[in-house]
Image: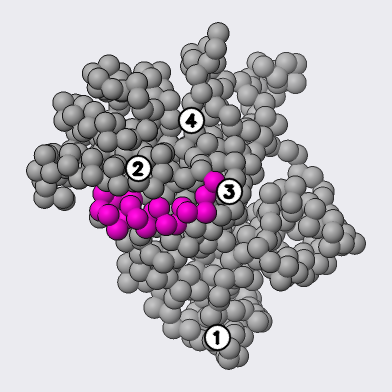
Amino acid sequence: MSRDKLIVFDTTLRDGEQSPGASMNRDEKVQIARALEKLRVDVIEAGFPIASPGDFEAVEAVARMVRDSTVCGLARTGDKDIDAAAAALKPAKSARIHTFIATSPIHMERKLKMKPDEVVEAAVRAVKRARQHTDDVEFSPEDAGRSEIDFLCRVIEAVIVAGATTVNIPDTVGYSVPQQFGETLRKLIERVPNSDKAVFSVHCHNDLGLAVANSLAAVMNGARQVECTINGLGERAGNAALEEIVMAVRTRRDVFNCDTDIDTREIVHCSRLVANITGFPVQPNKAIVGANAFAHEAGIHQDGVIKSRETYEIMRAEDVGWKSNRLVLGKHSGRNAFRTRLRELGLEFGSEEDLNEAFTRFKDLADKKHEIYDEDLQALATDTLQHATNERVKLIALKAVSETGERPVADVTLWVDGEERTGHGVGDGPVDATFRAIEAVVDSGCQLQLYSVNNITGGADSQGEVTVRVNRKGRVVNGRGSDTDIIAASAKAYINAINRVIDGAERLHPQV
Ligand code: KIV
Ligand code: ZN
């Protein structure tokens, strides 16, 4: 039986980045795009070019680097948006413009303040303009999940006539339920007279925890593109998780008459990279990529798996890229071995200077922690990338003292805008004292919203990986840092967040 191809459209770099705190700089986006290309996603939505000069540059850099996937840029229906997307995508080997406008009564009346006829006209105009730049144009009726089916049919027919080659049905607010959403796809494909001229796609949000289920219901009813993100990252409760959709379709080939081209062995690597870069850790019980996803705790399960793994395992851990911790490099490994292993992991630096800095960090780490695993290298590469951006604040030295019965104190020496400065802090614990010492120097005005520590590889000498989330005047930013000393990792994470906050240029949000 021949199977249809299910197109995988990854929007980690666009919708994923809309998660509060998850914004990424250009080099981080390029790093993730490289991993997505290796994962063999068909389309990478790299950003929203009109949002800010930084977003434009990031989309352009991804378009320049990626060769095997189509690179897509988001645009509202205005001419400036479409032209900015086209300009950013110019270096792409294969470029797609994705334009959208809301079609639900509530969005048209209250947000756009436009009549349905005006919405149809704007959608058609935008698609025609996008087609002047590329043959690959996607249109989304935003909030389709709450739009009237007759109006959806009208808009979709019109945009296909105008030249849209993909029609994406977004459940923008995560309101749909699987059976009904599947029906909607079936009806649209049946009722739109020219539906055979476009690929139908879905884009589901996870507000009711149904994003993957809704996407799969749509696939069962004819959708042949799914929009998704690594780890389900995305606005509010997130988007449909790529790894779950891909593995559901692959594992249940008896149910789905289609398959993807994804190289599933790259899934865990991509998941870790995205978690590292965005500072959104993966929950241990997350399907496919959570630390416990393939762990068998209960004795009866372990016994079954030893006798025959199929008793309790429906997928093989190695097929999605889980490997047992592998000792890869040590204190005596040279620069070449270091570079080669990073390359094998899909981690490359834009310049020799960054590679040199990463190698110096590697040597420091190897002195403290004799066994270096892939996970350590990944954290180290992320650290180097984050610190390679023009940082205004850098950590030079830290001393934190915590003693039973005494209030913890910390002293920091920082490099701030080219000047060495010191600060002292007293706090409820050594981490609190360290953050206060940093604030005594920079007075950033940031409020700490979240603090979490993970160990990277397990074992007492593992590096601690700290994520912090701070809020300054409503702008939410994540910072991360890793070190064998978790107080130092905490200081690095906090300083990373401060650098991101003070560096942050204003950007437009596509849906506001
Ligand atoms: O959720 C949504 O509606 C979107 C569109 C821009 C496709 O992200
Ligand atoms: Zn979305």
Determine whether the residue tagged by mark 2 lies in a helix, strand or loop.
helix
Q: Is residue 368 left or right of residue 148?
A: right
Circle on res. 131: 2
Label 3, residues with CA under 10 Å away: few <14, some 14-19, many ≥20: many
Sequence-earlier tag: 4 or 1: 4
Figure coloring: one colour
Q: Is residue 168 left or right of residue 2?
A: left
Label 2, residues with CA under 10 Å away: few <14, some 14-19, many ≥20: many
Type of the residue with mark 4:
Ile
Sequence-earlier tag: 4 or 2: 4
Sequence-earlier tag: 1 or 2: 2
Circle on res. 66: 3
**Magenta stretch contains residue 126:** no
Type of the residue with mark 3:
Val
- Residue at the far top in the pictured view: 1
Circle on res. 416: 1
Image quadrant in which the C terminus is located: bottom left
Provide the residue designation for mark 4: 7
- The reply to whether residue 139 is in sight is yes
Determine whether the residue tagged by mark 1 lies in a helix, strand or loop.
strand
- Which residue appears at 16% of the width and 26% of the height? 150
